[in-house]
Image: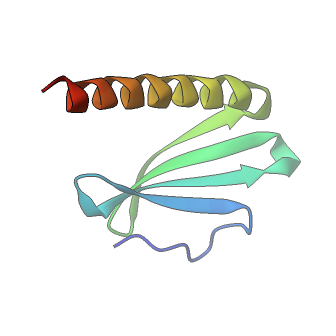
Amino acid sequence: MADSAGLPATSSVVLDARGPDRALRLSWHAEADVVVLSMWRENLCTGTFRLAVDDVPAVIAFLSTGLGAAYVDARAARFAG
């Protein structure tokens, strides 16, 4: 099970939809101008990605657009039948 031990104060843990033994940890590292995304399986880090702080707005825009489209599609499907 993922926990937030050892993470910086500006961090978050998101559990995988497949179960609580998998997680994505996100942490800001202002000293390096990056956000680190790390994949965890139980208490083992299986990979990391260093996202440049300048690229964060594009990632947020992508997620926001995708969420908006998914919501519209789900709502349309619910009222179609």
Q: Residue at x 69, y 43 (%)?
A: 35
Front residue of 42 and 18: 18
| Colouring scheme, one of rainbow, by chain, secondary structure, one colour | rainbow
Question: In the visual, does 17 lie left or right of 9?
Answer: left
33 up-or-down from 79: above or below: below
How many numbered marks, from 0 up? 0
Q: Residue furthest right?
A: 31
**Residue 7 screen position, x and y as percent:** 64, 68
77 on left or right of 56: left
- The residue positioned farthest toward the left in the image shown: 81
Q: What x and y, as percent, mark residue 48?
A: 51, 44
Q: Is residue 55 above or below residue 21?
A: above
Q: Residue at x 54, y 23 (%)?
A: 65
Q: Which quarter of the figure is the C terminus placed in?
A: top left
* Residue 31: % across, % down: 87, 49
Residue at left 47%, top 74%?
3
